[in-house]
Structures are given as C-alpha cells and as structure tokens.
Image (tube, coloured by chain):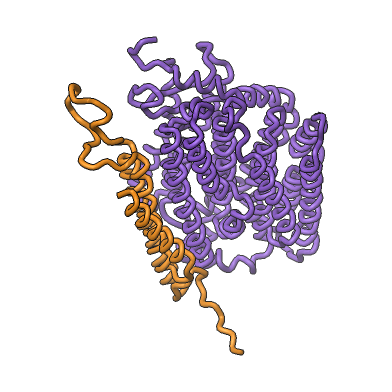
Amino acid sequence: MSEFGHILTLPILIPLVVGALLILINERHHQLKFAINLVSTMGLLAVSLILLYLTDYPQDGLNAVVYLAANWEAPFGIVLVGDRLSAVMLVLTTVIATGALIFSYSRWAQVGVHFHTLFQLLLMGIHGALLTGDIFNLFVFFEVMLAASYGLLLHGYNVVRLRAGLQYITINLVASVFFLIGIALIYAGVGSLNMADIAAQASLLEAGNRTLFHTGAAVLAVAFLTKSAMWPLSFWLPNAYTAAAPPVTALLVVLTKIGVYVVLRLYLLFFGEHAGASAEFGAPLLLTGGLLTMAYGIIGLIASQESNRIASYSAIISSGTLLALIGMGNSAMLSSLLFYLISSTLAVAAFALLSELISRIYPTRNQVLAITFEAFEVDEKHDVSSGYVIPAAMAFLGLSGMACALIIAGLPPLSGFVAKFGILHQLLQTEHLNATAWLFMILIISAGLGSIITFVRFGIRSFWASHREAPPRLKLTEVAPIIVLLMICVGLVIFAGPMFDLLERTSGEATNATQYIERVLNQPSVGGSQ
Amino acid sequence: MEFILAIAIGILFASGIWLVLRPRSFQVIIGLMLLSYATNLFIFITGKLAINQPAFTFSEAAAATELFTDPLPQALVLTAIVIGFATTALYLVVLLGSRGLTGTDHVDGKEREVTHE
C-alpha cells in the first residue's frame, strides 16, 4: 500500500470524531462549538487540497490513491479510492462548506440545537460518498449524508420547514428503497459490490445476468437521479431549498451535485467503452431527462419571484445541463462539464447565501424568521456584539447579486461564460451534429436568457423599487463567505488555462475505466505479495 | 419456496406503495415500513434460497462453497435493517412534530378544502 493511502480515511474520520465531540459541548458555548467546527472544516479543506496534489502529481507513479480498509484486498474488502475526480469534488465541497459555516456564525448556527454536529456528519457522508469504491458503502454514506441533511433541513424548526422536511424525508426514504433494490439486483447479476470489479465484469456477463445488471443499474439510477433532481423526480427540490436555512441551502446545492457526481462516476465505470454490450446503456434516457430538466428549470425560473426559488431552479437547470452532457457520452466535453459543475455550484451556493441577506431589505416578509429567533432567544443586541456591521450594504448586495446572475446565466466576463463557451465550443467541433445536440444548444442558450430575465426583474424589484430608508444590517461574517465564493469564480476565469489543464487530466483519468479497474484490483495488501 | 417469497414480496411492495401514496402521515410511515420489509426480503433472496446451510464456518477443512449459503446478502440485510430502523424513527419524530405544530396529520400540513357542489 502506498504510504499516502491513509489520507483517504481523514475526510471521513475527522468529521465523525469532531461531530461526536461537539455533542458533548453544551449549546451555550456556541462560540467554542463554532471554533471547533471551523477548525475541523478548514482542516478538511487542507486535507482535500493535499489529496488533490497527491492525485495530480502521483508520488509513486500510480494514478489514484487506494486504501484497503482492514487490509483486505479488493474486491473482497472495502476500498476507498481517491482519484482526481474525487479530489476535485472534495475541494469544491469543503470550500462551500467553509463558506456556509462562516455565514452561519452570526445567526443561523444559534437558531437550533446540534447544528455543528449535523454539519460535520453531513460532511462525513458527502466525503464518504466521494471516496468509496464500493456501491454498498455508497449507500451507507448516502444514508449518513441524508440523515444529517434531514436534521439540517429542520434546523430552526418552524411550520414551513416541517412541511418541507416531511416531504423531503419521504422522497428520500423511497429513493433509498430504490437504491437498495438496485444494489441487490446488481449483486444478483454480477456477484460483486466493488465498483472496479463490477466494471471489470461488465463486458463478460451472460445474457441473463446482463439483464439483471441493467435492471439494477436502472433502478439505482432512479435513486441518484432523484438526488440530482432530474425531471420528473425533482419536484421536491424547490420546496426543500426554499424552506431550509440559507447555509443549509448552500449545502443542499452541493448534495444535488453529489448525485450528479455519482451518476457520472458509475456511468463511466459501468457503461464506458470497455463495457462491451453494456456500453452506453441508458445514455439516451440521461440525455432526454437532462433536456427535459433544463426545459422544466427554465420555465420554473422565469416564473419565480422569490430569491430562494430562483436559486432552486438555477440548481435544477445546472443539474439538467450536467445530466444531458453525461448522456451525450462525449468524453472530450468532460472537462468543460466539470468546469461548468464547479462554477455553477459555487454561484448557486453563493446566491443561496445572498438571498437571505437580500430578503432583509423587506423586514415584514421575515415573520417566520422572527418567530424562530424569538423561540431560540437570538436577539438583535446579542447579534450586534458577535459581528462587525459592514458599510455600503446595498452596494454589496447589488454587486454580488449581479455577479451571481452573470455566472448563473453564463455571460462574460465571469466563469459561467467560460464554462458555457467551453461546452458549446466542444459541441460545435463534433462532426455530425444531430437534432438533440441542436436542441441542447438552444436550451442552454435559453437557460442563459431565462436567467437574465429573471435576475433583472428580481434586481429591479429588490434594489430599485424597494423603498427603505435604512439599508439592512449585514455582518462581516455573512458578507465574507459570499465574496470569497464569488472571488473563486473570478479566479476560475483568470486561471482558466491551468484549471482546464487540471480538469483535462481529471477527465482523462475518469474516462479511463480500464486503468481504474487495474489500479483498484491490483492494490496489494500490506505485507501481501506485491 | 421461491414462489411463496416472491408472492410475499410482491404483496408487501404493493401495499407499501399504496400506503405511501395516501394523504395521512401515519399511513405513509406504515407504507415506508412495508417497503423496507419488502426490500430486505428482496436483498435476502439475491444470494439464492438455501435450506439448512449455514452462512459461514470456523473450520477451514469443511470450507466448500456448495455447503454454505452466500453470507454477503445477509450482511447487507442486517445493515439495511439497522439503517431502515433509524430513518423510520427519525421520520416518526418529524411526523409527531408536524402533527403538533400544524394540528393535522395530513402530509401537506393542512386539510384539503372540501368543495361543496
């Protein structure tokens, strides 16, 4: 085993231990809890960056980092696999988590109990889902992630959140049933739960087993597509996003992208070119579903008035675009796909945080919020002491709102433009453009147009047509994460060259399933034969 | 044997799906439980049904695969049962909270308005 293998356990163990530790500290010491949580989350960010470095510049000439739990060789034991794709997603998750956590400092972490514990457990679930190389463990980590997200969605308990929470939990429990049935069918068909082993056997299956395998994969896809919000499995999303506390919404945006990541990962492994008769199974469905999701998102977006709903439908459009791109199966476009994923996730998360600040322009609309704060005794006086109130609040809100709009719509000069330009450029380079590709291009451009219309209308209503004498009070801890998230998007434009190089290497590695299979299945155990 | 189990799983799934689609949260939770029972049985039979065959042995001498049943689905079922219990308990808490705060057990948190002809 490579000496770096153990680093893969850190993103799972740190949040588990810290989350457990935080239960022991009384809620009155919220600053201490916040500090511990922040140190842990920043630590996870550092670990993710190290992992990205290790996977991108392999020290021992091997591509991915593989960890054999309890020293059992794959496919018999449980493996953790960190390659560039996992590492990129890990960095994205921890960046947004850090932002959401800092944002929650002045208010949201105090409106309920055990926010920090649930936050760490959510990170544990996400990281586990990103790193695992085994579909049953994927299920377990998904359940950890979802259980924590149920708690976080209900954080700051009120009627709206309960109603949304009840529906969100029901949907996800049913999706988990699909998940289990899918796993059982794949096991019945292939006889393995290890992703690399399943991928290796995909081309060798007999006809009967292949049918079982395909059925299992399709049932499994229902679970992931519910999480990644493909139409018609996406109706839960706007309600859940609108009801949740803003830092939680930012994390839920990441959760949706984890669904997309799993679809991408399993699709490339199970149904890539190496899979023989199984190759490209389900691709037309992903493409059609993605296109329908985009159309649904555009219609929903134009109909949205509230900022939370705008964020929800932006997330749906972004999921739809990604799923359609996966369904096209054009491996040359994978790097643009990842660039789009990173840029849109950052922007939608930033907008989800921003939307709560914007809603403070209208204090009367925040009645539900006021009740919550009363119940948990978060009063304004205490609030003032725990944060520096920034000047020029309206200017900040306007400018960052505009930046989010530019990224989500994909207009120059910000990163959304680079992402969409990359996608369209790659698409136009393919020789035989079929009708679906044209439809996709029309939809992606209409998505930009729809976003612009919605954001302009929203901006005029919020900033120009609002008659309020005193600007809303914004804390530095609430403003800084939004600025940082948007600055990363600016950085993505400035360093678009190196970023695309990294993503090229990432997609090159992710599409090379044969290499992944060999790497995981040939990982020697410690003390075993080399 | 397979036939009986298949029928049982089918009935559990059918009842579960019907209950999950009902408007009362209590019906939904019973439906979710039936679905998870059905799923557990389903996972269990993926390792093929075998009568009187243990899942593992401690004696290496007697380790012939045809004498034993597949232990993996049993391990999976165990995990699935535990996770299912936990999520059902969590759902129950939310259900009770919703009943207390909204005063109704309708899943939408409010009764459907009755229209008079």
Residue A34 in view, yes or no:
no
For the point 39% across and 67% down, which residue is it? B96
What is the x, y in percent for residue A341? 66, 38
Classify the position of the C terminus of chain B by image quarter.
bottom right
For the point 34% across and 13% down, which residue is it? A528
Q: Is residue A515 above or below residue B82?
A: above
View extreme (bottom): residue: B117
Q: Is residue B114 above or below residue A449?
A: below
Q: Is residue A55 above or below residue A97?
A: above
For the point 42% across and 61% down, which residue is it? B16
What is the x, y in percent for residue B101? 45, 71
Rendering quarter of residue A20 = top left
Q: Is B2 positioned to the left or the right of A320 in the image? A: left
Q: How many marks?
A: 0
Residue nearest the observer in this picture, A298 or A427: A427
Residue nearest the observer in this picture, A513 or A273: A273
Q: Is A181 positioned to the left or the right of A300 in the image? A: left
Question: What is the letter of the purple chain?
Answer: A
What is the x, y in percent for residue A48? 52, 29
For the point 40% across and 24% down, which residue is it? A74
Residue A232 in view, yes or no:
yes
What is the x, y in percent for residue B93? 38, 62
Question: What is the letter of the orange chain?
Answer: B
